[in-house]
């Protein structure tokens, strides 16, 4: 089955700096890679996603890059703000396994 | 309007009891899921249902059983609760099974004493 590894597990940055979270996946058949943000005590919510036919996608301060050859994808947050503080999960959808496999999460703390 | 709702929000019960968690979605989605989030925040798929048929069944204990009376509801029944079942359980739904956004419910925090 699919295995998704996520690093780092915790990340602290100063407000205004950039944050990068990296994930690797094992199943070459995976074709959909969403990123979810979970604030303390809340539900996970999708913030951005990318499909395997695209190498990069941006949405305002958030961007995701995908390297299919290396089987890794990354989340980039620029100009971080305190409200960006949350746990971020990467995930990969494998058509063969027909399920979404999540990474272990990254606790991002933006220091004012 | 709430897209995916769960009840109850909190559930405290003793070992050995049987309990159910209810989930409803008003998005018209075809697929619903149950996830377990443990104390380390790890999210793991338990079940998914597509048009009332089970399409994924992770290797969870058979004490856990999903029940879907219709496309908008997917309930989770747990028999003989154990301490290790303590976690937050999230229901989710997506338009169809596959590479689509999943919308999560607010979660049910289950504590087994």
Image: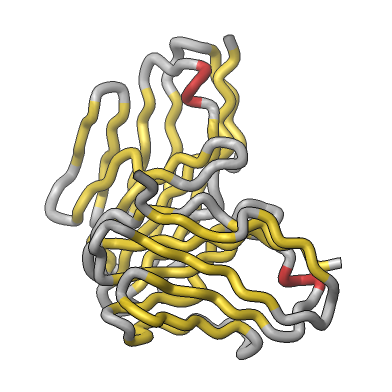
Q: Quadrant of the N terminus of chain B?
A: top left
Residue at screen point 68% across, 76% down:
B19
The answer to whether A32 is drawn above or below residue B20 in the figure is above
**Is residue A69 in sight in this rendering?**
no
Looking at the image, residue A66 sits to the left or right of residue B110; the answer is left
Q: Percent x, y for residue A45?
A: 41, 44
Closer-to-camera residue (A54/B30): B30
Closer-to-camera residue (B13/B93): B13
Residue at screen point 46% across, 16% down:
A81
Q: Which quadrant of the view contains residue A110?
A: top right
Q: Percent x, y for residue A19?
A: 45, 26
Q: Quadrant of the C terminus of chain B?
A: bottom right
Q: Percent x, y for residue B29?
A: 25, 64
Closer-to-camera residue (A88/B47): B47
Which residue is farthest left?
Answer: A53
Closer-to-camera residue (A86/B10): B10
Residue at screen point 29% across, 38% down:
A64
Q: Which quadrant of the view contains residue B107?
A: bottom right
């Amino acid at each position: 089955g699919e295995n998704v590894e996520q690093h780092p597990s915790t990340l602290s940055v100063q407000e205004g700096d950039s944050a990068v979270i990296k994930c690797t996946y094992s199943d070459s058949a995976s074709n959909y890679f969403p990123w979810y943000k979970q604030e303390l005590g809340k539900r996970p919510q999708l913030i951005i996603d990318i499909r395997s036919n695209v190498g990069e996608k941006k949405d305002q301060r958030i961007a995701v890059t995908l390297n299919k050859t290396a089987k890794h994808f990354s989340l980039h947050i620029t100009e971080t703000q305190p409200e960006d503080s949350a746990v971020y999960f990467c995930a990969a959808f494998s058509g063969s396994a027909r399920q979404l496999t999540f990474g272990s999460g990254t606790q991002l703390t933006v220091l004012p | 309007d709430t897209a995916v709702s769960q009840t109850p929000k909190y559930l405290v019960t003793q070992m050995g009891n049987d309990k159910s968690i209810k989930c409803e979605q008003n998005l018209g989605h075809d697929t619903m899921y149950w996830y377990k989030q443990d104390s380390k925040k790890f999210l793991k798929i338990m079940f998914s249902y597509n048009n009332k048929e089970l399409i994924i069944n992770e290797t969870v204990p058979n004490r856990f059983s999903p029940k879907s009376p219709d496309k908008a509801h997917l309930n989770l029944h747990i028999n003989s609760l154990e301490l290790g079942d303590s976690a937050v359980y999230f229901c989710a739904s997506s338009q169809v099974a596959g590479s689509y956004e999943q919308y999560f419910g607010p979660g049910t925090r289950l504590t087994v004493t």
